[in-house]
Amino acid sequence: MMAMNTITHIVKRNGSLVLFDQERITNAIYIAQLSLKLEDRSLARRLSDIVISELAQAYSSESPPTVEDIQDIVVNVLYAGGCRQVATAYREYRAEHARLREEKNEQIVVNDTIPYKILWQVFTWNVAHECDSVDRLNAQVRDGRVNQLIEDAEALYHADVDKLTERVIKRGGEIRIIIIAGPSSSGKTTTTLKMTERFNQKGIEVVALNLDNYFKDLETHPKDEFDDYDFERPEALDLELINEHLADLMKGRAIQTPIYNFKTGKREKTTVPFSLKPNQMLLLDSLHGLYKPMTSSVPDDFKFKLYIEALCQIRDNKGEFVRWADLRMLRRMVRDNWHRHYQPDQTVGHWHYVRRSEMKYIVPYIGQADHIINGSLPYELIVHRKHMFGSTQKIVREYENQPTRLDAYIRAKRIHDLLATVEPIRDEKAIPHNSLMREYIGGSIYKY
């Protein structure tokens, strides 16, 4: 017969109240017994009755115990009852469940290619920091509070980089290649550099192999009716050479890496020697890093796969969330203009290739990642407003009456209308020189 139970609820680890169930205590003790090949459920029940009595003396329905409180009392009861081996097995059972909970928290739950759990975390952070909408973001600019938001957002991003770095380190010497994948302008390059910094601080040697240098000559790609090249496909890279080089590196052989000149659209004649020592890890930064043919020559156990996306959770003045792809397009417009001599209208006109490739070769593979990192910064719309609003006005006028550019016009009009509602940043000095944002607007401490 069950002991009289005056405890109606318990406090879970996440702080929520749930109904108390003594049977869970009985089952946990019984599982510990079974691990020792003992099968005495009646004893497990009697021990759980004692636990209930102990709980009733220390807690009440107005002051309920936590899960940890209950578990501590279970251990004490087992030791007091002479069940030392069962107590030890129960503690191991608790430790194993703690490990499984941690792994579950790290698991990426993806439905329809959307990591909803991570999105909720991003959104709740934005709400707490008053930047979940354009209106609230604008208020911070007007009130002079945006510098604190910039500081907090930078700290959040860097904490996530620290977290994923620790996850890799936990895997010990098993991992040889860290793949950083994600769509265009999601923050892969900066994240790669920052991971390298952190590994170096931990005494772990990491070397990066820039797969952008493996692009085929631009003239080999097909052109469309607008005289534009489709270089967004995985096949725009020399996949055969990449796999050959990766296989050689895993075997300890040196390779000669190509050098790609984005201004000329061709590989240089010279190459650079590259090798991977047995105690080093290789970092691969690529749009298509999760695309299997990209690294098929390397066993999966050797890889840690990171996916980065600009998971923007900010609502516009219509109450709709800003599109991640639009945010990334704004980033690329800025970067292409100063870094690759590619005009903003060209970036918008080319974006349909980007999205087609992302939807076919990048987004479908998000569920294969070991870790997802948010590459968006909640303050960046005010930066794009300063840099790109004038350009979007021109692009809208240019494409307005061109039926063949309807897709580009729709995109340009959408981001123009969005930026028209955004307050521009007044002083970019508040953006640190090690910020991911600097990858796009310039002024970074990193070399891109």
Image: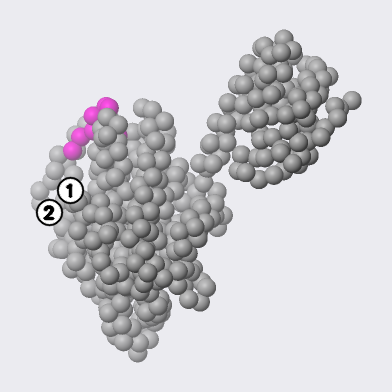
* Quadrant of the rendered image containing residue 411: bottom left
At 31% across and 65% down in the image, what residue appears? 331
Residue type, label 2: Glu
At 53% across and 37% down in the image, what residue appears? 103
Task: Report x, y in % for residue 275.
Answer: 20, 34
* Quadrant of the rendered image containing residue 217: bottom left
Task: Report x, y in % for residue 315.
Answer: 48, 69
CA–CA distance in space, label 2 to label 1 = 7 Å
Task: Say if mark 2 contacts mark 1, CB within 8 Å.
Answer: yes
* Vertical placement of residue 156 versus 387, above or below: above
- Reading the image, the residue beneath label 1 is 258
Task: Report x, y in % for residue 374.
Answer: 42, 53
Is residue 403 something that shows in the picture? yes
2 or 1: tag closer to the N-terminus? 1
* Vertical placement of residue 383 versus 431, above or below: below
Which residues fall within the magenta stretch?
A: 274-282
Tag 2 secondary structure: strand
* Quadrant of the rendered image containing residue 324: bottom left
Task: Report x, y in % for residue 314.
Answer: 46, 65
Q: Does the magenta segment cover residue 380?
A: no
At 36% across and 49% down in the image, what residue appears? 155
442 left or right of 408? Answer: left
197 or 283, nearer to the observer = 197
In which quadrant is the N terminus drawn?
top right
- Reading the image, the residue beneath label 2 is 268
Specify few, some or many for label 1: CA neighbours under 10 Å numbering under 14, 14-19, or 20 or more: many
218 or 420, nearer to the observer = 420
Residue at the far right: name it.
1
